Image (spheres, grey):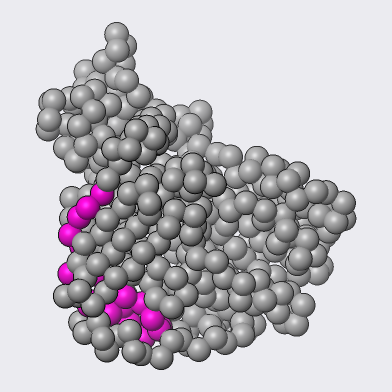
Amino acid sequence: MKIKTVESDYDKVISLPRAEHKRPKKPSILFRTLTRVIGAGDLKDTSFTYEASDEFRALKEPYLIFMNHSSFIDLEIAARIFYPKPYTIVCTSDGFVGKEWLMRSLGCIPTQKFVSDLTLIRDMKYSLETLKTSVLMYPEASYTFDGCATPLPRKLGNLFKMLKVPVVMVRTYGAFARDPLYNCLQKRKVKVTASVSVLFSKEEIASSPVDELDRKLDEAFSFDSFAWQEENGIEIAESFRADGLERILYRCASCGTEGKMKGEGTSLVCSACGKVLTLDEHGKLISPDGAAENGEVRFSHIPDWYRWERSEVRREIEEGTYHLDVPVKIGMMVDYKAIYMVGDGRLVHTADGFVLDGCGGKLHYEQKPLASYGLYADYYWYELGDIVCIGNRDALYYCFPENVPVAKVRLAAEELFKLKR
């Protein structure tokens, strides 16, 4: 999937009128059917099936749908499960670029990832109470990098109490294994399934404290796709399964060097120390001869390696050595017409937060660590490149660095939020 981009001058872009807020639109049966039909091919390829609880099937009123987020197939899964019932979809605002009319007709509600948005809550209430339509939301906000749940915002229990509707949980299995974000949009042959249940009834929401609701939500979003693959004997035989793996595993676990890892074919190689690992058919990292003993493989489980990288980032922050200062190409979003490519700049990230300067000194933007609990970072964003996105309701800045592990920047932003809070 691509996105419309336009080369433009910063002064011209910053003076453009901002996108007009519009209330959510209830999708017609025509667009509901269109969404289902478009996704039918992918679901057939994955032999998709799902199980739904009796409690869910008994629901007649609108509800809030929470779903884990692994790949684009998640939207197609929702279309299969809930058809023909109408629902609106909370989605990232850049998804509206160049196709606002279509997205609104599909029932999409735009919001900026990791930016506080009280308007979104009003739009969700409007969908539920006025349109009498359920609302689908991916609370993780971004695709998982390592197949495990990404941090959720705190106090979501408050949202449940404001909306006063049941909360339905859709949990997918195999969606990440089929199309992990790091693997350069190459799909694998994996069966995908889902389970649908009522996570919270209206009565439970009303009687439970917010912290208890948040705790149960965290438990529901506790998963590990690589462990699931191994435990269920899921074989991924594709010869490209390690392509792009350095996007997650950017720091060598043997020598500690960053930026020298390369995932290609079925191998992960560090050019600094020469370490070679193989990603086997069950998602484990092993030595090329098949052995994983005598300390030859420090982390055979990819999420363990990613957690170690997180701990290393936190150590750097605590020691005062974490520092990012890189040249970037800058794209801006101020409306739904295009991503405006406004030129070059530098992105700096330290314990004090982000600073972006560019466009010949015209652009200067600062974002403190407590501005958000997470960071919009993405791989191969709309087939343009890896990005770090910062900004506020006035403008979003899509920064395209070269040879920079955006996963580390995301980890650093998450850990800085925890430390500063």
User: Viewed as shown, does residue 136 lie left or right of 73?
Assistant: right
Q: Position of residue 285 (x, y in %)?
A: 32, 27
Q: Is residue 249 magenta?
A: no
Q: Position of residue 411 (x, y in %)?
A: 39, 44
Please determine whether, in this image, residue 235 is positioned above or below residue 9: above
Please determine whether, in this image, residue 70 is positioned above or below residue 16: above
Residue under the point 50% across and 37% down: 224
Q: Position of residue 254 (x, y in %)?
A: 24, 23
Looking at this rendering, what residue extends furthest in the top direction?
A: 294
Foreground of the two, 285 or 273? 273
Q: Position of residue 171 (x, y in %)?
A: 60, 49
| Residue 124 visible in the current orientation | yes
Q: Is residue 340 magenta?
A: yes
Please determine whether, in this image, residue 303 is positioned above or below residue 159: above
Number of labels in the image equals 0
Residue under the point 20% across and 66% down: 345
Residue range highlighted in magenta:
324-344
Where, quadrant-wise, is the N terminus in this rendering? bottom left
Foreground of the two, 90 or 231? 90
Residue under the point 33% across and 68% down: 365
Judged by its main secondary structure, the magenta piece is strand
User: Viewed as shown, does residue 167 lie left or right of 327?
Assistant: right
| Residue 380 visible in the current orientation | no
User: Viewed as shown, does residue 324 lie left or right of 96?
Assistant: left
Quarter location, residue 235: top left
Residue under the point 16% across and 75% down: 360
